[in-house]
Image (cartoon, rainbow, N blue to C red):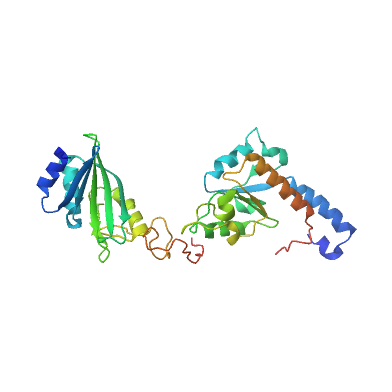
Amino acid sequence: MGLETVFGHSYLTTRLDEAVNWGRKYSFFQYPFVTACCGMEFMSVWASTYDIARFGAEYPRFSPRQADVLFVVGTVNEKLAPVLKRVYDQMCEPKWVVSFGVCATSGGFYDNYATVQGIDKIIPVDIYIPGCPPRPEAVLDALVKLQEKVARESVLDRKYK
Amino acid sequence: MNSYLLGTFRAKFPDATLETHAFRGDETVTIKKEALALAAAWLRDDLGFDFLMDLTAVDYLPREPRFELVCHLYSSKHNYRLRLKCPVGAEDPQVDSLTGVWSGANWFEREVYDMFGLKFRGHPDLRRILMYDGFEGYPLRKDYPLKKRQPRIAHRD
């Protein structure tokens, strides 16, 4: 942001961190990269019963350039891997990645010629959600964990290019 | 075991028919691969099999002939089904394309080519359909290593 490069780690930047992180963690714009059946479960998180809007993350952006969090929901195969990488590269900093479900996390039971054995082979991942598919509660738990993680960050940590 | 359909087929192609059988009403004909396109055209035009429901293959390694092409035919006019098989050897894995008979064979044959490496003579566009360009080998062949991984490809527009 400019200011922090002048002041470094000081009272001013920690206050700034707090304000910025508070804004960031309650207003995630997410990019749902939905490839498989997990997407059906993912949708229920939006619906009224679980209502992800309570956490400020209900707004999906279908352009990676406007998104903060990349939700990789479902199996990613070798043919799709370069597309996922491209989507991630297009997102602006600061950005986070959530791996939704066991297939995105480790390939799941698709231990075969076609499937990427975990998206962390391609892009860095912040939060992993286990399950096949995960319960909506698990997704909300992951979201809260991501918020906690964002709250711990400093504006000095990220390298803005 | 002897149905009208199988009897008619044998009478029409006495030399090309390798084997016929019926199990619980499922009729199967195994023919030589040289006669495949001819038999397919006859089945469509004279017997009314207007719908190619499925076309796939099986790898019977180490048997020789190694592969077997399997077509499932359906006649919407007679509400009748027939399974048409044809063995394909490993040294010359080529058969005639059925795209001229049923245009729906196009993507099925591309899939069989992609997964088993069988080539279809006369196919208008024989490319891989599921795997990406640059993938080496044929993953559904029995001798494709189970844990084999190939280098990741770069993004292409």
Q: Residue A22 location in percent, x, y?
A: 79, 48
Q: Quadrant of residue A121?
A: bottom right
Name the outermost residue toward the top: A48
Q: What residue is rendered at 55% in x and 51% in y?
A: A103
User: In this rendering, is residue A135 above or below A70?
Assistant: above
- Residue B65, image x and y in percent? 25, 60
Residue A112: x percent and y percent?
A: 47, 57
Does residue B77 sit above or below A83 in this rendering?
Answer: above
Residue A67 in sight here: no
Q: A55 or B74: which is nearer to us? A: B74
Quarter of the C terminus of chain A within the rendering = bottom right
Is residue A68 rendered to the left or right of residue A35?
A: right
Residue A157 in sight here: yes
Quadrant location of residue A91?
bottom right
Task: Pick the quarter of the image with the N terminus of chain A.
Answer: bottom right
Query: In the picture shown, does residue B81 fall above or below B56?
Result: above
Give left or right: position of B60 versus A158: left
Side of B22 where A26 appears, left or right? right
Q: How many marks?
A: 0
Residue extending farthest to the right is: A11
> Could you tell me residue A120's position as x and y percent?
61, 59
Task: Give left or right: position of A43 versus B107.
Answer: right
Residue at image x 82%, y 50%? A19
Residue shown at the point (47%, 62%) measured from the top left = B147
